[in-house]
Amino acid sequence: MNQLVQITPKDMVAVALQPLKAGEAVSYGAGTVTPLSDIPMGHKVALRAIAPGEPVIKYGFPIGRATEAIPEGGHVHTHNLHTGLSGALEYEYRPSHPALEPREVATFKGYPRKLGRPGIRNELWIIPTVGCVNDNAQALAKLAQKFVGGSVEGVYAFSHPYGCSQMGGDQENTRQAIANLATHPNAGGVLLLGLGCENSGVGEIIPRMGQYDPERFRSLVCQDVEDELEAGLSLIEELVERMRRDARVDCPASELVVGLKCGGSDGLSGITANPTIGVFSDRLTAMGGSTILTEVPEMFGAETILMDRCADAALFDKTVHLINDFKGYFESYHMPVYENPSPGNKAGGITTLEDKALGCTQKSGSGPVKGVLKYAEKVENRGLNLLSAPGNDLVASTALALSGAQMVLFSTGRGTPFGCPVPTVKIASNSPLAAKKKNWIDFNAGRLLDGMTLDELGGELTDLVLAVASGAQTRNEINGFHDLAIFKQGVTL
C-alpha cells in the first residue's frame, strides 16, 4: 500500500497516510519521495522543489503560497506556507454541473406528519422562548421521563441563553430559530415554554411557525400560572396521549433532508470521510432527497467550485452573496476573515483555510447546487443546498436542524462527542480514531486506506443513514447528548 497519497496529478504535495521517517523513501501513485524530516500522519510532503511565493497545489487547486524555498521531500505546513486569500471578490459564473443519474428510491421507516416531511424520531421537545426558563424546561423534562417508551422515543428540553435583550436581525434570527425547532418533523409533540415578559415571547414565536399541527403543539407562559411545573406536565400528558398513537411506516428516501458538517478535521478528512459523505450526498439527491452543506467560512478558497455547480445564474448570484456577506460579517466586527484553521486542524495536518475548504467541500459530492438558504430558512428545493451559518460545530449543526435536516452527518479526524437536536452521525476519517473512540464514532471512513473503495463506503454510509432514519440510535443518542446553539449575531442589551 502507498504510504503517501497525491490527490490529483496536478498536486505538488502528497499527504502521509501514516507517520513517515526522515531519510526513508516512500511511494505514492506516480513515484517515490524521501522525506527530509519525520512527517506526522495527515501532513504534507513536497513532491518537487517549490520556490518562494509559488502557489502550492493540493486537490488540484492552490492552498496558499510558499513563504520560503521548500525542497523536494520537505514538510509543507504552517512554517512555510501561508494563505493566499483576501476579502470580498468578484466572481464569474462558469456553469459546470454534470447531472446525476436517477437512482431507484430506497425507503426508511419514519413517522408521517400531517404537514411536511416525515420525522425519523418521535420525541417530545420542550423549547424555552427565553433563557430565564431554561431550568423550568429541564425540570419538566426530568418529570416527563416517566412517559418515555413505545412510540414516545424521548423527552428533551433545549436550553439556550437568548430570547431577550436582543435587537433587530439578531432577535429575529432567534425567533425564527425557535419557531423552526417547534415545527421540526422529529418532534412528535412540542411544549413552547415562555416566561411572559421577554422580547421573543410565545406570542412572537407562534406567528413565525407558519402552518403547524395543533394536536402536536402546546404553549405555556410561566408568569400566567401558579405552578408552571404542574401546568406544564398536564400539557405534556396531552401531547403524549397523541404521540402514543404514532407508528413507523415505510417512507421514501426522497423525503429525507440530511445535513453535512465536519469538525475536528485532520489531513485525512478531505481524502476519506468527506468524499465518502459526498458519495452519499450524490446518492440521496439522485433519489430525490435533499442535503445541506453549511460552514460558509470553510468554503472560502473553494467557493468557485460550488458557484460553478449552481443550477442557474440566480443561484450563482445567491452563492456570491452567501460568501461575500459572510466575509462582511467578519469585517463588521473588525476580525480577520481567515482566522482558520484551528490548532487541532493544524496538528492534524491542515495548514491554510484553502486547504481546509477544499477538503470540507468534498462533502457536497458532484451534483448541482439547487438551493441557497439564509440562516433559519427551511429547505424547499430537493437536491444539494447551501446554508448560511458559521463553522462552529454546534452552531452549524443546530442551523442544519433548523433548516429541516432530520439528521446530520458529521465527519471528524480528531473526534468529538456532542449531539445537536437531531441524530448526529459521527464519521471518522482514520481507523485509529474509530478504534480509540468507539463511544463517539458511528462510522469508519478510514477503511478507504485499507483497500475499500469510495463507492463501497458510500453505499455502507447510505445503508447506515436509512437505518438511523428507521430508528437505529447514533452514539450521541446512546450517550444522551442533545444540545442547541443559536447563532448570536448582535449586541446584548
Image: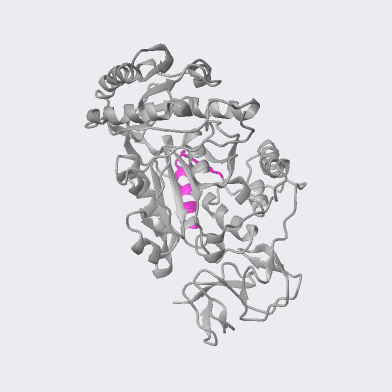
Q: 473 above or below 247?
A: below
Q: How is the image coloured?
A: one colour
Asked if residue 101 shows in the view, the reply is: no
Q: Which region shows up in magenta? A: 275-294
Q: Nearer the viewer, residue 294 or 258?
A: 294
Residue 277 lies in the magenta stretch: yes
Position of residue 322 measured from the top left corner of the image (x, y, whole percent): 66, 40
Q: Nearer the viewer, residue 131 or 343?
A: 131
Tell me the chief SS of the magenta region: helix
At x 54% / y 55%, what residue is drawn? 362
Position of residue 209 measured from the top left corner of the image (x, y, whole percent): 49, 21
Position of residue 223 measured from the top left corner of the image (x, y, whole percent): 43, 15
Q: Nearer the viewer, residue 41 or 27?
A: 41
Q: Quadrant of the N terminus?
A: bottom left
> Residue 390 appears in which quarter of the rendering?
top right
Residue 186 lies in the magenta stretch: no
Q: 97 above or below 34?
A: above
> Residue 230 appears in which quarter of the rendering?
top left
Q: Quadrant of the C terminus?
A: top right
Residue at far bottom of view: 23
